[in-house]
Image: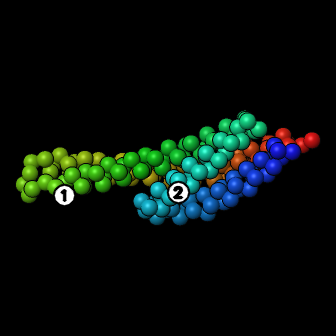
Amino acid sequence: MKARLFGDALGRIVRKRLRALLDDAEGALRRGRDAELHALRIEVKRLRYTLECAIPLAHDEALVALDFLALLQERLGDLADADTFARTYAELSSHLAPGDERAAGIATLIAAAARERARALDAARALWRGDDATYPERLAASVSATLASLSANDAP
């Protein structure tokens, strides 16, 4: 009985977090704004960490869904890193006196961070849109399989 209650509660939370992620991701990736992408990364983490609770009851299915989420979280993490580097370099640059010879080196680092951000955003967009079956569909299917496995494990 406790497993059934746990599975039901977990299912409700997972469905809610998956809906939020699916609703927010396309626009966030299309617009490419730092704050939206950061919020999306947190949504992915929340769903991923919640799904980890399903491993004891739906091991194989949960691992597939977790792999899908880890992939998106990694792409969004690359973006977050590039954004952090760019902000840090810009902050450093703002403290240099005019004509400081270190400015050129920092400008090079800022440009490299911008290129890495563009590459990471392109990679996240490519993952989301995919070539054949899109990532959102595959993610939703893997989460559904996890939830179905939870229900099957709850059967008396």
Measure the alpha-carbon separation of dots 1 and 2: 30 Å
Residue 94 image label: 1
**Residue lying farthest left?**
99
Q: Which mark is residue 72?
A: none
The reply to whether callout 1 and callout 2 are in contact (CB within 8 Å) is: no
Q: Mark 1 vs mark 2: which is more N-terminal?
A: 2
Task: Residue 109 in the image: state x and y as whole percent.
Answer: 25, 47
Q: Secondary structure at mark 1?
A: helix
Residue 151 position within the rendered picture, expressed as x and y whole percent measured from the top left: 83, 46
Residue type highlighted by circle 2 = Leu
Regarding residue 148, the answer to whether it shows in the image is no
Answer left or right for 136 relative to 144: left
Q: 84 or 8, which is in the foreground?
A: 8
Write down the residue under mark 2: 40
The amino acid at mark 1 is Ser
In what element is the residue under mark 2?
helix
Q: Is residue 96 visible?
A: yes
Q: Residues within 10 Å of mark 2 (few under 14, many from 20)?
A: many
Q: Nearer the viewer, residue 25 or 118?
A: 25
* Within-10-Å neighbours for mark 1: few <14, some 14–19, many 20+: few
Look at the picture and state if 87 lies above or below 3. below
Please state if 78 lies on the left or on the right of 133 as rendered: left
Q: Quadrant of the N terminus?
A: top right
Q: Find residue 93 and report its image quarter.
A: bottom left
Instruction: Please state the horizontal and vertical placement of residue 141, each as a whole percent of the image.
Output: 72, 49
View extreme (front): residue: 2
Residue found farthest to the right: 156
x then y, percent, for residue 81: 39, 47
Say which residue appears at 47% left-offset and 56% top-offset: 38
Residue at 92% in and 41% down: 156
